[in-house]
Amino acid sequence: MELIYASTRNKEERVTASQAILKGLAKGGGLYVPTEIPALDIDMEKLSGMTYQETAYEVMRRFFTDFTEEELKHCISSAYDSKFDTEEIAPLVSAEGAYYLELFHGSTIAFKDMALSILPHLLITAARKNQVKNDIVILTATSGDTGKAALAGFADVEHTKIIVFYPKDGVSPIQKKQMVTQKGENTYVVGINGNFDQAQTGVKKMFSDEKLAEIMNQAGYQFSSANSINIGRLVPQIVYYVYAYAKLYAGGEITKGEKINVVVPTGNFGNILAAFYAKNMGLPIGKLICASNENKVLYDFFTTGTYDKNREFKLTSSPSMDILISSNLERLIYRLAGDDAEKNAEFMCALGKEGRYEITPKMREELKDFYGSYTTEEETAEFIRNLYEKTGYVIDTHTAVAAGVYEKYKKETGDSTKTVIASTASPFKFTRSVMDAIDRDKYSSLGDFELVDELSKIANVKVPQAIEEIRSAPELHKTVCEVDEMEEAVKKFLKI
Ligand SMILES: *Cc1c(COP(=O)(O)O)cnc(C)c1O
């Protein structure tokens, strides 16, 4: 049976999975959501014997129903291959009473690789399926990790171009170096004098600009999105929750049907929404613990029912979570509103106009599966240091936000349910902050790559290929622009 996707803002707009992937964003700014969440109707015995790739197929075929088996399997095997430095793709590491689900073994060492290594294949397949003649222009705003992962995924993919906007002073030195050294004739990287939200707003504006779309079409181009608003990114993220659960079961860590909690360091609300979808498919997940850094707009939302982005934007040591507008939350709001596009559109309109909205008490009740908290910069650093001193295991700043929140959750609730923490980046990607956390006095005078070597020594982990590659790579992208010049930059690159 075909699964149809609806827009969160217009109940008339309905598309197939491949069309939703192609378009990225619905007309009028809505997001595509599946009209129902398919059941994970496979026996756990069977699931627990599956490889990552096999698990991916079982999850994806339930969502992407207009792809053939051959097409999906081809996309999966092209994505989850030797680009990952571990055969398991997403290994689980047990430390201090929690399971860290390491999602950073792909080519850019952050969890965005889990979805962005498959998205180009899904997109090209979707274009073929829908007889698209235009070249696809991927337009992306990044808080650091999406940009590089998308660039790596799309570089030199035929009939695509990729344009990435990042906040010039809002990403880590390693993140920046990874992006500006990107090879590929079809890649374009631009720093903006602004923050991530401004980059994202600029990109969304271009997406919904019909005049621009017409100019693009005349020149043989159309936009699509690699941001986590694309359903083609969200679904691949469901896979690793299913896989992690099955691996815990296979290893005898949990019994059949035993609930686990999941902690997710959250920015744009994509990763935790994938966990929510996994739960709704029937995976035994108890609490969905949403961890924020000092940009704690989500924590405030969960505790008050009011989403309010009118506040100071903070640059933290977990830049990929420095976000005040969590785009994917819209998909949850739509759901809480009883799949009511009109009602959701009202909330989103208020968010656009006043920067805030308040959900109804009834909708709040539906939020009981979620728990939100945050850590301060000091708490994040302290967690990294303590964990390292106790166990020798080094985690990155984003993962540390999650682990710190998990500690708070346990203290507050006494809940001892077995828990998976989404470990979203390699510590090598945020070396400066990680090493500062461990011993600032000792490491603060070292250069970025000296720190990399020190980290490798103290953690007893080989320097990842992604870091080795950029040590001496030349800077290829030097463009910087103002927020209101983003469209000009796009036109210049496409020569339109
Ligand atoms: C993107 C990112 C996050 C936030 O994920 P969302 O899906 O946007 O909530 C957390 N940690 C890292 C390392 C990231 O790159």
Image (cartoon, rainbow, N blue to C red):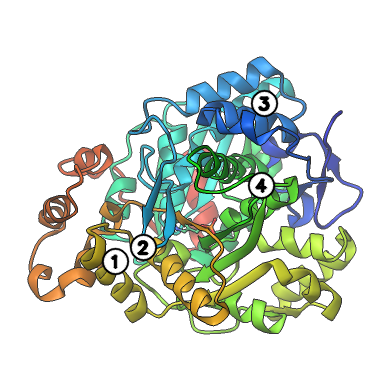
Q: Is the residue indicated by label 2 positioned so its CB lies within 8 Å of ligand 1?
A: no
Q: CA distance from mark 3 to mark 4?
A: 20 Å
Which of the two residues, 187 or 381, is positioned nearer the viewer here?
381
Q: CA distance from mark 3 to mark 2?
A: 46 Å
Q: Which label's residue is closer to the chain start, 3 or 2?
A: 2
SS of the residue at dot 3? helix
Write down the residue under mark 4: 212
Residue that lies at the very extreme toward the right in this rendered image: 12
Mark 3 vs mark 2: give the one in front.
Answer: 2
Write down the residue under mark 3: 127
Mark 2 vs mark 1: give the one in front.
Answer: 2
Q: Which label's residue is closer to the chain start, 3 or 1?
A: 3
SS of the residue at dot 4? helix
Asked if marks 2 and 1 touch (Cβ < 8 Å), the reply is: yes
Question: Residue 368: x percent and y percent?
Answer: 73, 71
SS of the residue at dot 2? loop
Q: Which label's residue is closer to the chain start, 2 or 4?
A: 2
Q: CA distance from mark 2 to mark 4?
A: 53 Å
Q: Which mark is residue 387?
A: 1
Residue at 45% over, 41% down: 113
Mark 4 vs mark 1: give the one in front.
Answer: 1
Q: CA distance from mark 2 to mark 1?
A: 8 Å
Task: Classify residue 386 as left or right of residue 313.
Answer: left
- Look at the image and tell me in which quarter the N terminus lies: top right
Task: Classify residue 135 as left or right of residue 467.
Answer: right
Dot 3, how many residues are within 10 Å of its Cα: few (below 14), some (14-19), or many (20+)? Answer: many
